[in-house]
Amino acid sequence: MNIHLQNKHLTRSGFTLMEIIIVMVVVSIIITGSFITLSNDASDEIQSLPSEIEQVTKRALSTAKIDKRTQYILISPSHIWQSTDPDQTEPNSETTNQVDLPPNCSISYKRSEDTGWSNVQTIKDKAVWVYSVAGICEEMSLMIQLENSSAEIRFHPLTAATIKP
């Protein structure tokens, strides 16, 4: 009887196998989740750009109609912005309708009559997209690439909205 009582009063030290397995599963889930989040950053950034660019194009089209003044969407390697001056090389402090492109992003454009893509690599290659006072813009497609992700965006000439492929 004395031996039985002594076993009940033993203190336990260390962890059980089940506790160790649970901790390892939780740690592996956390590591996997953070890896997926880090690897999808470029993809997420590319996927948000079409809607941001569409907002810029729609605003330029409505501004051209309301103000009865030709508007331009200027596309440089680092920005896409609305202007009334087609020769502007960078957005200025008064520019409110713009999208800043991510670093290391490459952008190309294709007009409706073009057969191939034109790259915008320097400010000299800047694309100028015209929005007339009649509420019409030329049909344009943009290709944005960042690392292993890309997005092709086509715009409707009457609405400046994106056209789903």
Image (cartoon, grey):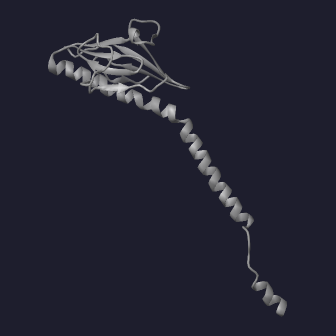
Q: Residue sitting at 22 percent across and 16 percent down?
A: 135
Task: Look at the picture and state if 24 lies above or below 88.
Answer: below
In the foreground, 138 or 3: 3
Where residue 15 sits, quadrant-wise, is bottom right
Report x, y in % for residue 100: 38, 26
Farthest residue toward the bottom?
1
Report x, y in % for residue 96: 26, 27
Q: Residue sitting at 44 percent across and 27 percent down?
A: 102
- Which quadrant of the figure contains the N terminus? bottom right
Please state if 1 lies on the left or on the right of 112 as rendered. right
Please state if 119 lies on the left or on the right of 52 as rendered. right
Report x, y in % for residue 108: 44, 15
In the foreground, 105 or 131: 105
Q: How many numbered marks does the figure carry?
A: 0
Farthest residue toward the left?
67
Where residue 121 sits, quadrant-wise, is top left
Task: Look at the picture and state if 41 lies above or below 79.
Answer: below
